[in-house]
Amino acid sequence: EHFGRGAGDCDLAELGRLVDTAGGDVVGEVRQRRNSPAPATFIGKGKVAELVAAVAATGATLVACDNDLSPAQGRNIEKALNGDHAGDVKGRVSVIDRTELILDIFAHHARTRQARLQVELAQLQYMLPRLVKLWSHLERQAGGIGTRGPGETQLETDRRIIGQRLARLKTELADIAADRGVQTKQRGDLFKVSLVGYTNAGKSTLMRAITGADVLVEDQLFATLDATTRRVDVDERRRFLLSDTVGFIRRLPHGLVASFRATLQEVADADLLLHVVDASSENPDHQIASVNEVLADLVPEERDTIMVFNKMDRLPPDRAEAFRNHHANRHASALFVSALDEDGPGAVRSAAVDRLLGRERVVRLQLPLTRMDLVAVFHRTGSVLEEEHDVRHCRLAVRLREQELERLLGREPDIEVLA
């Protein structure tokens, strides 16, 4: 059984949600199936004429394409839509593609300095090959007189200004990444869990329910652009870090993934991924595939993952049962929850704890009495089950994570493994 509508219907519905998130109102749609795009206008001549008529009938001021357009394709469609008034700003119909629309949403939702810098970097990288289409010139923003080099055309000037700004942004983001690296090091080798998933799947709601973190929770696409990390205490000795970060989407622009790599580092560094899926979406399998495509770029090696099908409360009982049977057969250890129910976040937390405990090992160690500082380390990083001393040695039975044990053995030659 296939759950949800066809991919084409879902794609246009999602484009409508993107437009809505960006502050627009959808007044109509034009569809076309082609084996390959028309080189000049992406859609065929007949569809261009249909689009012109639809814009005239609805009074639309913006056309959003669900694909990426070349600079020439966007320019040619705008010429067709605006006719003799192509040079008039007032009343002009603009054309944007999918990447431009997503970048606009990211720019609107960026709240921290890092997010704003990352969005600007992605925007400028997208803009650079499309300068011919732009109306305004960047040298006005950069000071105008005195900014142009000898013999430069306006296009060359704009490219040079963007290139300089890109270099500055990359330097600033590298500094932020270095600071985050220091913070990550200070967290030590705690078990790291990261929430990943399609945008608006409910990751932030789960994050808030599990940790109490004051994260933004809104029913819109890309409400969260910044990584949030909180420590979750299991007991006096065991704890893990839980991170929430930006959601993914079908055909997430590669420039955005590259620009947001510092934010998405939490995903790359995770020991366990909680892949959150909106069970009530029109095509969950479609969303899972889109997320996995981005993850393959971020996390090349296979990573321990638990599928978390969220929003199960939105499905009628008969469909919920069929959905559960369908996906339980495909995803081992999958969870079917609602982040709004009392039991849902608890089940997700318990699953993460089980994986944490599964990474632990009980080992017997011997240390010289002169290295009692290491005994304190084992008390801090694991659970000391037994401790005995003689005149020269201290012997311990310790439960701790494999990763932590390997790190200590590699760093401390005084530690001897007995069993």
Image (tube, rainbow, N blue to C red):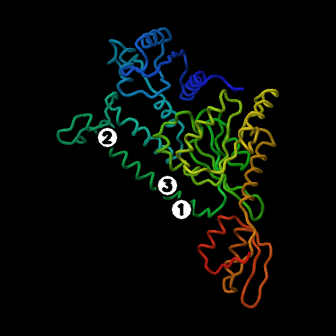
Q: How many residues crowd mark 3 within 10 Å: few (<14), some (14–19), many (20+)? A: some
For the point 61% across and 77% down, which residue is it? Answer: 412
Q: Mark 2 to mark 3: distance in Å? A: 27 Å
For the point 71% across and 38% down, which residue is it? Answer: 330
**On screen, 325 above or below 405?**
above
Q: Which mark is residue 142?
A: 2
For the point 47% across and 39% down, which residue is it? Answer: 254
Work out whether residue 89 can be spotted.
Answer: no
User: Is residue 188 or residue 292 the one in the foreground?
Assistant: 292
State which quarter of the image contains the N terminus.
top right
Image-based side of 30 in relation to 69, left or right? right
Q: Where residue 2 appears, x then y in whole percent? A: 69, 26
Q: Where residue 335 appears, x then y in whole percent? A: 75, 42
Of label 1 and label 2, which has the lower sequence position?
2
Residue that carries the numbered disc 3 in the rendered image:
177
Kindly check if marks 1 and 3 are in contact, taking CB atoms under 8 A apart as contact: no
**On screen, 234 above or below 332?**
below
Callout in the foreground (2, 3):
3
